[in-house]
Amino acid sequence: MYGIEMVKGLLVTLKNFSKKPVTIQYPEQRVSQHPRFRGEEFSWYEERCTGCASCAKYCPLGIIEIVTDPSDTAVKQGDKYKLEKFDIQLFRCMFCGLCVEACPYDALFMGSGFEEGKYTRNDMIITIDDLRNSPKNPSTWYRPQLEAKNYDPRSGQQLSWKEVGRESWNWHKTEKAGMRITPDPKQD
Amino acid sequence: MSIRTEPMTINIGPQHPSTHGVFRLRVTFDGEDIIEAEPILGYLHRGTEKLAEERNYVQIVTLTDRLDYTASMTNNQAYCLAVEKLLEVEAPLRAKYLRTMTAELQRIASHLIAVGFFLQELGTFGGTPLMYAFRARERILDMFEMLCGARITLSYMRPGGVFWDPPSEFWSSLDEFLKEFPSDLAEMEDLLLNNEILMVRTREVSPLSAEEAINNSVSGPVLRASGVKMDLRVMDPYDAYSMVDFDVPIGSIGDNYDRFWVRMQEVRQSLRIIEQCVDQIEPGDYRLDLPKVLRAPEGTESYGKVEAPKGELGFYLFSDGGISPYRMKIRSPSLINLSVIDRLLVGWKLADMIVSLGSIDINMGEVDR
């Protein structure tokens, strides 16, 4: 009986021997991520951000630090605070994406990469300048308007702040202060 | 001539490749026979229950991912059910189906790990069955990445539904998976279920009687292998389980082979559930319109439980009216299933020790929390 099992096992081996390997030799070959992949290099649109710090409040680890300056300009209805500091401690981030979920103005997006390595911890803190200059390849995670456009962040196409909003979202109609996007009159 | 022998105590772990995480087992041997086994826990303690007391109800979902990291979906599900009970709301029907489907996909992935490592511990050469299991699991993780952007730490579910509808590519790849996976599974079953080496090594080794299993509050496949037909999906249906039809496979004597066999059969049943869900699911809401920061009334409490791949997973929540629970208690199946380890090991040989440990399918992230 032992021999039959041996033959059976070897037949499976033979069957798989003729198949294409499923493993991928990583640095040379790459698997492409799906559009919703929650990656590094947050895409942040300054034009959309009002400095409301919803992301900082909603972060389970509290790693986003936002400092705004209300005294710089007179804050009127519809205007926004001046942002002085927007630090994300990337080395503590677990990429849960709750900050993106919390953002009411579609200003913050997850990134699409995963291969960032730095030598010191200080380099792993993303500052406001890094966020301003980073490539804008937003992930479509929690952003159905990008999915509706069939946008793929790995294609390399960068999106400007005008292309990433969801104008018809309810919050934009109800929220008054700090609103940068005019609601679509047809929706009302 | 008689040889004078002394019992010898050996530490296995905490850093040992076959202990499923940082788990330490102090075993006393008399020759090759185990005469005493004592599990020592706490090396992966992260204080999840305490951390939950200072996070709001949605943020805790990310903590539950990290309990049993091979089955994040069912952890999310148990927690979300507990919060929904606390707030006295119910998820929309589409969300229920999506949760059921993803939880069953996760069950397949978790059982494939359990079966793969069980065979690895039996000494299968080069880990071939493990790699076959991982090949199939990889497809499930790929689908999870389409769904929620992560493979392990999913955070897919939210109190009141799921975070978003699946993208269109998810449905096509799920169809493809349902078409191709049964043949992969049949290949594994054909190779393993009647394999003589596996039978000799695992049949009638470390049996657990039904009485002993019930007395130790064991749940999940370990309990069902002992011949007790106890499955929360049938006995207390949650989400969409009352609307689907499936069998509960049970073993006979609860030996290592039965525990392995029950898991293999459950994968088939999970496939049946997913197929029915795909047929029955209809467009609709996927998430309740709840506030971003949830508050439960003061003094309310709830217990949400699901049949996780490893057994009954429960979350007990107590609210003091604030934005975070006053107390969150986790009833983790791995910890309670692990409590029978000395009954399984004592009286058996050294060679069966790791196999018996693998047959309970523990996950240290959940044991120590």
Image (cartoon, helix red, strand yellow):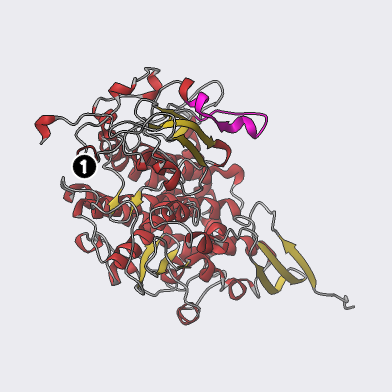
The kind of secondary structure element at disc 1 is: helix
Q: Quadrant of residue B270?
A: bottom left
Within the magenta stretch, is there residue A59?
no
Lateral position of residue B40 relative to residue B111, left or right: right
Mark 1 highlights which residue?
A: A174
Say if B300 sits above or below B139 in the image: below
A12 or A128, nearer to the observer: A128
Whole-percent x and y of residue A180? 28, 29
Whole-percent x and y of residue B131? 51, 41
Q: Is residue B344 visible?
A: yes
Magenta part of the chain: A114-131
As drawn, which residue projects farthest toward the top? A157
A173 or B274, nearer to the observer: A173
Lateral position of residue B277 relative to residue A29, left or right: left
The subunit carrying tag 1 is A
Say if B278 sits above or below A130 in the image: below
Question: Which residue is drawn at the image coordinates 42% and 52% (left, top)?
Answer: B59
Q: Quadrant of residue B148?
A: top left
Which quarter of the figure is the C terminus of chain B placed in? bottom right
A96 or B150, nearer to the observer: A96
Question: Which residue is drawn at the image coordinates 40% and 26% (left, top)?
Answer: A46
Say if B160 sits above or below B306 in the image: above
Say if B81 sits above or below A56 in the image: below
Q: How many marks?
A: 1
A187 or B11, nearer to the observer: A187
As drawn, which residue projects farthest toward the right? B1
Which quarter of the figure is the N terminus of chain B placed in? bottom right
